[in-house]
Image: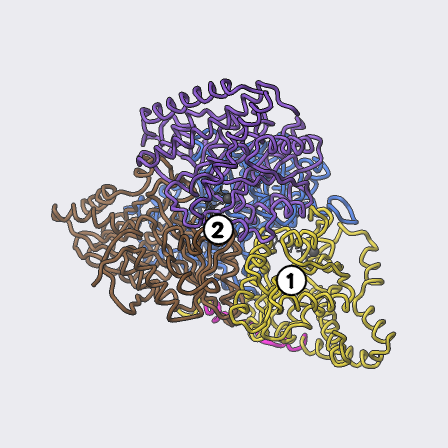
Chain colours: A purple, B yellow, C blue, D brown
Amino acid sequence: MALDKTRLLEAYRVMKTIREFEERLHVEIATGAIPGFTHLYSGQEAVAAGVCMHLSDDDYIVSTHRGHGHCIAKGCDVIGMMKEIYGRADGLCKGKGGSMHIADFDKGMLGANAIVGGGPPIATGAAIATKLDGNGKVSASFGGDGSSNQGTVFEAMNLAVVLKLPTLFVYEDNGYGEHTGTSYAVGSDDIAGRCEGFGMTAKKVDGGDFFAVYEAAGELFDQLRAGDGPAALECTITRFYGHYEGDPQRYRAKDEVANFRESKDCLKNFRQRVTGEGLLDDSDLDAIDAEVAELIDRAVEEAKAAPAAPISELETDVYISY
Amino acid sequence: MALDKTRLLEAYRVMKTIREFEERLHVEIATGAIPGFTHLYSGQEAVAAGVCMHLSDDDYIVSTHRGHGHCIAKGCDVIGMMKEIYGRADGLCKGKGGSMHIADFDKGMLGANAIVGGGPPIATGAAIATKLDGNGKVSASFGGDGSSNQGTVFEAMNLAVVLKLPTLFVYEDNGYGEHTGTSYAVGSDDIAGRCEGFGMTAKKVDGGDFFAVYEAAGELFDQLRAGDGPAALECTITRFYGHYEGDPQRYRAKDEVANFRESKDCLKNFRQRVTGEGLLDDSDLDAIDAEVAELIDRAVEEAKAAPAAPISELETDVYISY
Amino acid sequence: MPVKSMRDALNETLHAEMARDEKIIILGEDVAGGAGGTGVEEAAGGIFGVSAGLYTKFGKERVIDTPISESAIIGAAAGAALAGYRPIAELMFADFIGVSMDQLYNQIAKFRYMFGGKTRCPVVVRMPTGAGMNMGAQHSQTIYPIVTSVPGLKVVIPSNPADAKGLMTTALRDDDPVVFFEHKALYPRKGEVPDGEYMIPFGEAALVREGEDATVVAIARMVTFAEKALDGLEANGITCDLIDPRTTSPLDLDTILESLEGTGRLVIVDESPPRCSIASDIAGMVASEGFDLLKAPIQMVTAPHTPVPFAKDLERAYVPSPDDISAAIRKVVAY
Amino acid sequence: MPVKSMRDALNETLHAEMARDEKIIILGEDVAGGAGGTGVEEAAGGIFGVSAGLYTKFGKERVIDTPISESAIIGAAAGAALAGYRPIAELMFADFIGVSMDQLYNQIAKFRYMFGGKTRCPVVVRMPTGAGMNMGAQHSQTIYPIVTSVPGLKVVIPSNPADAKGLMTTALRDDDPVVFFEHKALYPRKGEVPDGEYMIPFGEAALVREGEDATVVAIARMVTFAEKALDGLEANGITCDLIDPRTTSPLDLDTILESLEGTGRLVIVDESPPRCSIASDIAGMVASEGFDLLKAPIQMVTAPHTPVPFAKDLERAYVPSPDDISAAIRKVVAY
Ligand SMILES: Cc1ncc(C[n+]2csc(CCOP(=O)(O)OP(=O)(O)O)c2C)c(N)n1
Ligand SMILES: Cc1ncc(C[n+]2csc(CCOP(=O)(O)OP(=O)(O)O)c2C)c(N)n1
Ligand SMILES: [Mg+2]
Ligand SMILES: [Mg+2]
């Protein structure tokens, strides 16, 4: 599963795009220009990238309230996403969804979800579909450490095992569910172990290491594609910002994030490794940095300039016919 | 934890009372005299008895749709129960509850429950109360193999571990949830193992063996009382009748129950062991048999003769004040 | 036309539609029954027999027994729908919406809107519903008022075998999510059922009887009770329009208003407790949009504001009776 | 009287009542916040700060942070109540009833009845509710119509800080289960709040304003919008009774009917979508019990039959506005 140069660049581009998207939102939100509740994915990019690099548009994912990273990694249009977050008429969901409800069905992105634990049953159902289609496609749900305690998620895992469905349960343990620590809320203190108890293969990796995620996910997807039933992947990671933008983060030691940014930044780690091993040059990555910065600039500009979702559309899109 | 003669007789009386109660219902229901849906506990008596022998009126249990056995083992008035099942005015719940909703708060019996998985969160909450009371009391929830797949149950187990609550999750694996086999519906094929994954001690015993259940439950309750958090007990057992009375049981091989009745009947096994070991005489047990038969005769007679729940009470007992 | 029970009409419709469209799958507890047992493979066909024979006919890939995990059942149906299928999810009893509501309420109902109209989620959730079988407080509820309140869902409640067939066929071809309530006490109800393909559009009420003195709106089993009430009253010269909305979302308010143009008097019968019920819902709309037509106070005949009791007499008293309906009709007529 | 925000009024009430009655405990996600973290122990005090300081004051035995497991939260509250406590369970957002409804709907609400009156279950479930903060379709719903439909539950929805205090105090001393809705947009709303013990009985509406031309019934945030509408209309010589039911179960229908005796015209404002809403519920009851008083069609001002949209303008258009309310009042007055 060694990645060639093109794929490595792709991985970096995905992670960098997510990072830049979120860092820019962090700034824009502070200005008050963006409505609602926004949860940034900064710091967790390697998970979305490492998992989604194995998927095509015909594979499905379901995401969470912290979903921008998953959307970008699955190929959603970045400008359409930004517009959606600004509530614009031509946002990916016409401004009706917002940050927590971005979907793109052409890309197999079945939706972010603002209900913690809402997604895994849906991804499980999508795997019923791919299994019936018999086309070797798979699904994956993303969820946090906090989501791993939700009853709907346990049910989905059991159902997936019972029906031997090709679906991957990805748990991003970023240490907290809102203000509550994983070590408190997950009784077993071991999400992967608990998943194993459900009768599926489970792996635990450093979510700050793209290569670790990519390799583990690859092995698990191989198992899924071989028809051997579902699997779980726990990725230990941190989020660089608060639970939502505006979170005072009193539950965190002052230097917690700083330390993580130092030692666990997936972008730094990736760059170090690929340049260290001579797989890519700094200049390759710098070029991507520049392109991504330009893309995000454009996304924010276009989003700001785009027309607001029109009130005439308030009552459309509820039903196909009624 | 060796049981003296009095306690052995008590255990036998409980199991025999349950058996007789259910066998008589089996007959009475066939006459059409009893309204609704009834789920008999015949065959599983050792579980209720083995667990509840460790509990006093101040300990709490929560039960299921198949709850008669748990009620009797926890000390509910047998005549009041029978009247409830007949829908009588002086039934334990005034005829408003019925077979699936028997409760007796003076006995620490917090209610049968017709929602599969409804009980464990409630027993978990009762354990919050006993823990706060600091009186060494505990709670237990009963549930079937089928219930072990319900999200509410998983949530309750995790919460109990997180809060280190003195509550026991008893799973009676009688091979089926309605018409569906445990081996199909429990993906891991191992309820106790799955519970362990939640971070609690779990044991698995032969539910047809009173002594095995009694000993395992005793050890687990000791752990609970020592403040070491919750535990789970899986009891492998069979039910002698259908899921509900009237169930044609097409999912079962013709001789399945007959074989179990032969080899796994807890009453037979108990008698064999206690008489074999010289702990009790056959005559002791025969005397109980006679007393129990008489009690159940009386219960059915009184229930039949009792006045129906009066229509004047239709709208009472909804609120304390409104 | 052949006479069939509502159960058989539904069962045959499921067979016909699954044969027609291979994207239809069905999942739920014991929709086949028997998996992992020592007996026959298809042991149940649904606890009420509505899905009987589907497993044998269409196989375990399309007729899927599930663990007792209602959130996963409805959620999986949602996911399969987003991925191109037309799943039928069965809640064994409507009451179990308690443990599965999120997937219906926050997910299926909202996908199309939240995602800006870019997807469809053609799930049919079947829910046996209603009181009358002494099943107690947690197995006897109506639930449809709650579901009707949810934008994004369509709500169907047939009162007879022919409607059950016509509405189920429509449901299984509809591109929106549909919640299909089947009153347990009506499963054995017999009636003539058209052969062949038969569809009834949503949002078209049935005018079950015509009359002059009042308009009676009734749902599901209450239609049969209203008919009994009317049989009695007609002997006394009182005749009514009897309207069965058949779907509560969309609701055919027009047919009710048209009838009121003739009668001016409205009785609404709903087996639900009164608050935020279909009865008060329709009454409210009529008080707003048909006020000028009304010649008398609207009468609502509902269950009381209590859980469903177990004992026979209590439950009989709980459910609105033909006598209750007659009394309400007499009251509006005498006004 | 001191002026306080609704958030502070609620917070102080929780403090006072927990100090008074040691059987009161509170549980939910982040009701303290900080467990298992590297920072301070009480980091949140509830996502909206309503439970701030309770953990520090009453300790972790009585102020219990939970995993994200809403069924277990409400179920555990139920169990603790049956075992003698008075738990307050918090759903971080009312919308999360989707994943926890069974414990409220099939359990807590029904215990007393199913068990023949032999127990009580004094749980208070707190639910931040409502639209207006661009939180999208799954974080903005009203939910109270659904809860009001359930026999066995009491439903409280304050519109101002004083009522919040008086009703919360009553809730915490009530022996029945109470669902207490707190409109998120009202948390910062300020108003005078009586010092000391202050209780408001359930089932007593507040007559917020008196007038002659119409009766306006409004709930929660809609009360403030109705006041704005009335401010404008009064300048034009139109005056109304403005009634805030404060509790929808029990509902004080009498006060509404009494007002209608004077005005004959009714406008009901509810932030919920229209079907089976509190608006149609009250309209239906009035059409039944107050028909003779009505001089004009009842006007219901509600959200549309859609999920709550995200974008600012869309959400503003979704929520009934003071202008919508004025228009409805003008309409009934002009009739
Ligand atoms: C059912 C439900 N409960 C609670 C919430 C509120 N909430 C939103 S995100 C969140 C924390 C989720 O934690 P985790 O799963 O670890 O994801 P993270 O935010 O860390 O990415 C909570 C409690 C919700 N949205 N849905
Ligand atoms: C939430 C819910 N889902 C489904 C049912 C219908 N139902 C009643 S009992 C039962 C099977 C329960 O199986 P198990 O837990 O093994 O208990 P057993 O009947 O074997 O004692 C089912 C599916 C229910 N009552 N509640
Ligand atoms: Mg987290
Ligand atoms: Mg079982």
**Label 2 residue near ligand 3, CB within 8 Å:** no
The magenta segment is B300-317
Q: Which residue bears the numbered disc 2?
A: D37
* Closer to us: B204 or B94: B204
- The 10 Å Cα crowd at callout 2, few under 14, some 14 to 19, many 20 or more, is many
* Closer to us: B322 or C21: B322
Q: Secondary structure at mark 1?
A: strand
* Closer to us: A129 or D297: A129
Q: Quadrant of the C terminus of chain A?
A: top left
Left or right of C55, for residue C209:
left
Q: What type is the residue that disc 1 sits on?
A: Phe
x and y, in percent, of residue A148 in the image: 56, 46
Residue A81's disc number: none
x and y, in percent, of residue B136 in the image: 58, 72
Question: Chain for mark 1?
Answer: B
Quadrant hosting residue B126: bottom right
Q: Secondary structure at mark 2?
A: loop
Q: Is residue B309 magenta?
A: yes
Farthest residue, direction front: A276
Q: Which residue bears the numbered disc 1?
A: B142
Rounded to the nearest angstrom, the CA distance separating label 1 from label 2 is: 34 Å
Q: What type is the residue that disc 2 sits on?
A: Gly
Q: Is residue C43 magenta?
A: no
